[in-house]
Image (cartoon, rainbow, N blue to C red):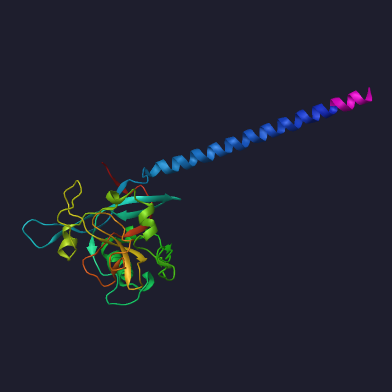
Amino acid sequence: MEKEIVGLLAVLLCCVIVASCQKKGQEETTASSESKTETETSEEDDGISEGDHILFGTYPQSAMSGTDTFETEPIEWRVLEIRDGKALIMSEYLLDVTMYYYDMADITWEKSSIRKWLNEKFYDAAFSDSEKSLIQTATIKNDDNPLYGTPGGNDTEDKVFCLSLEEAQLYFTGTEDRMSALTDYAVSRGASVNEENKPENGMKTGWWWLRTPASSANRAAEVDCFGNIDTVKNADGVDGCLVFSEGICVRPVVWITLTDSIEEVKP
């Protein structure tokens, strides 16, 4: 009789433990679902997704008919990544021309004149005070060239920057996706133009800088007018462009905080 009572108590205790575990599991599942719903709602509030195009800041772009002046227009950006309410965005068009460095020298992104130009002249020209308040200062990884081992230098803190070689591979589906058209203003500033290669909009394509060094420290990687990343040795055994090369454009990149004020470009 005593053994039966002990056995019954053991069964009851087991049932209580199982019920408790089931309840705990249900509570955890519910909490997880609520958290996911809140996250999804938060993402839906701003209505911006990766791959969308938005307007942010202004810059001279289209030539005014019959004049040598240019319309200052909203800058169109492609959303490359969204993380924690912030978006990594890149200009859709080639906005301007600048050298990677103003002289023939061994140089890294940290010391480049293009970095200084982006974070000072372009930053002040393109963004209002309210827009600047949305731009994040990002820690930029400057890795060595993956093919040649050319040193990338120190990491930097930047508001505006160029993509790295690896990022240009990561965020685009292929060469056609990486092709970028020139604004009239960029052409007027001396951008190299491919007269034959035109996207669907009829605009001509150009070349744009990456921040990664190329086959040597006096060369930087870039994307050509056909969307190819210059990562293969040419007949002369080098790749990339000399840092003081002219005619190569910039596609600025920034991290911004997403707000309801951000205007999406509808297809």
* Residue at (32% x, 70% y) in the render: 219
Residue 98 horizontal side relative to residue 18, left or right: left
Q: Does the magenta-highlighted stretch encompass residue 7?
A: yes
Q: Which residue lies furthest to the top in this view?
A: 1
Q: In which quarter of the image is residue 25?
A: top right
Q: Which residue reaches farthest right?
A: 1
Q: Quadrant where the C terminus lies?
A: top left
The image quarter in which residue 151 lies: bottom left
> Predominant secondary structure in magenta?
helix
- x, y (%) of residue 5? 89, 25
Does 101 appear above or below 164? below
The residue located at (18%, 51%) in the rendering is 198
Q: Is residue 99 left or right of residue 184?
A: right
**Quadrant assignment, res 160:** bottom left
Q: Which of 92 and 24 is in front in this view?
A: 92
Furthest residue to the left?
Answer: 66
Q: What range of the chain is rendered magenta? A: 1-8
Q: Position of residue 171 (x, y in %)?
A: 37, 51
143 lies above or below 266: below
Where does the N terminus fall, quadrant-wise? Answer: top right
Q: Position of residue 66 (x, y in %)?
A: 5, 58
